[in-house]
Amino acid sequence: MYQHTFHRHKTREVRVGNKVVGGDNPIWVQSMTTTDTHDVEATVAQIHRLEEAGCELVRVTVPKPEDAAVLSEIKRRIRIPLICDIHFDYRMALAALDHPVDKIRINPGNIGGYERFRQVVRKCRDKGVAMRIGVNAGSLEKDLLDKYDYPCPPAMVESALRYIEIAEAEGFRDIIVSLKSSDVPTVVETYRLYAKQCDYPTHIGVTEAGKPPYAVIKSACGLAPLLLDGIGDTIRVSLLGDPVPEVQAAFDILQATGRRVRKPELIACPTCGRLEIDLEKIVAELEKRLAGRQIPMRISVLGCVVNGPGEAREADIGIAAGRGKGMIFRRGQMIRTVSEAEMVDALLEEIDRWEQEEKSKQRTHASTAGVNTPADSNSADNGTARASPKSVSLPMVG
Ligand code: SF4
């Protein structure tokens, strides 16, 4: 059987609070608050909504002393790692580091020179706090703009590498790197160039992507080639407005690229004149009843016999409809035929059975190997990457 090849860019592991970024760890989903950070109630409320949506790392901006002053309070009231976003004023980074924050994001292009950067590095090192060197095409150092004319991929990578070198000279290696641009080809080329030269983990994203739905598509266009190349250890989809939809969009991109599968993937045909059942109604009902289920499986629902049996055979559970009836397939085997009215219930029965069997297989495997399953261990995810379109035996997620 044909297998996709996939090699994740080998990166070091860097701890950020209760998450380890890089290595074989899951590609974590990050977002950023839009509140005034010093408005603790509003900031914490927004972070709670992000946590509820599944966000795994959150960044807050720290432009003023009053924002730095409330970081302990925010940290105390949230469950996910807290990252402080610093631009222009290195003293805000130093102030933030007086609080139990989990990562500092520095923009090397606007931090005010190497010596100021060194001071932040030393304090991160002494406090054991990770740092993101967040290069941004819109704020690249002047000498690099003079050298390259515009913020091209080599200029951005050179910016990251020079600051990495300075940090390393201070004995600091808890580094994560981002190289963001609002231009998709620049994003893809820059991260690819970086990955050839460096093994610090990366935070990936297309910056200032704009307003959804176009911004989600633009982000997907930039992130998918990287994820398929194995690049990226944390991900953000930057959307104008409420940050909560960023989280779902990021998970959808991870799922569509097969890099992190947390929920059932519904494959449905677009329908055409051959359609023999009310497919939209069936898919809507299935989506509703599967909402919130964290089963990494592939379910296909196709409207006629043209592609139906073929797709259904490729899925974990599939149904191929025709003339008011549906043939249900389970991993390639046709197991039963049901009427159109019974399709959703029958599919859900099979999905439940499949889930129970997978859980039981994992428990057996775990007890033989003496390890916890993700489902048992409360781990957020196992970072499953789908290697083949035949998504059989994907481990369950917690
Ligand atoms: S599976 Fe059948 S109904 Fe669906 S788009 Fe293809 S030909 Fe049309």
Image (cartoon, grey):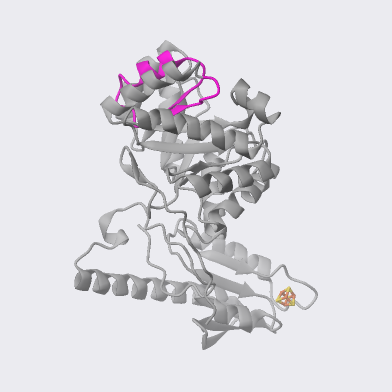
Q: In which image quadrant can residue 73 be found?
A: top left
Magenta segment: does it hold 211? no
Question: Is residue 287 toward the left or the right of residue 130 in the image?
Answer: right
Q: Nearer the viewer, residue 147 or 122?
A: 147
Quarter for ligand 1? bottom right
Position of residue 33 relative to residue 98, above or below, is below
Residue appearing at x 61%, y 22% in the figure? 143
Residue sitting at 52 percent across and 58 percent down? 255
State the extent of the magenta-drawn residues as a range: 84-110
Residue 138 in sight here: yes
Q: Position of residue 59 (x, y in %)?
A: 45, 31
Which residue ends up furthest to the top in the rendered image? Answer: 65
Residue at 22% across / 70% down in the picture? 369
Q: Quadrant of residue 292?
A: bottom left
Whether 108 is among the magenta residues is yes
User: Residue furthest toward the right?
Assistant: 273
Expressed as whole percent of the image width and height from the top left, the position of residue 199 reads 43, 46
Quadrant (top left/top right/bottom left/bottom right) for the C terminus: bottom left
* Image: 357 above or below 83: below
Horizontally, residue 284 falls left or right of residue 259, namely: right
Q: At 41% from the left edge and 75% from the top edge, which residue is drawn?
A: 354
Q: Could you say which is closer to the camera, residue 337 or residue 389?
A: 389
User: Is residue 104 in view from this perspective?
Assistant: no
Measuring from the top left, give residue 340's x and y in whole percent: 62, 78
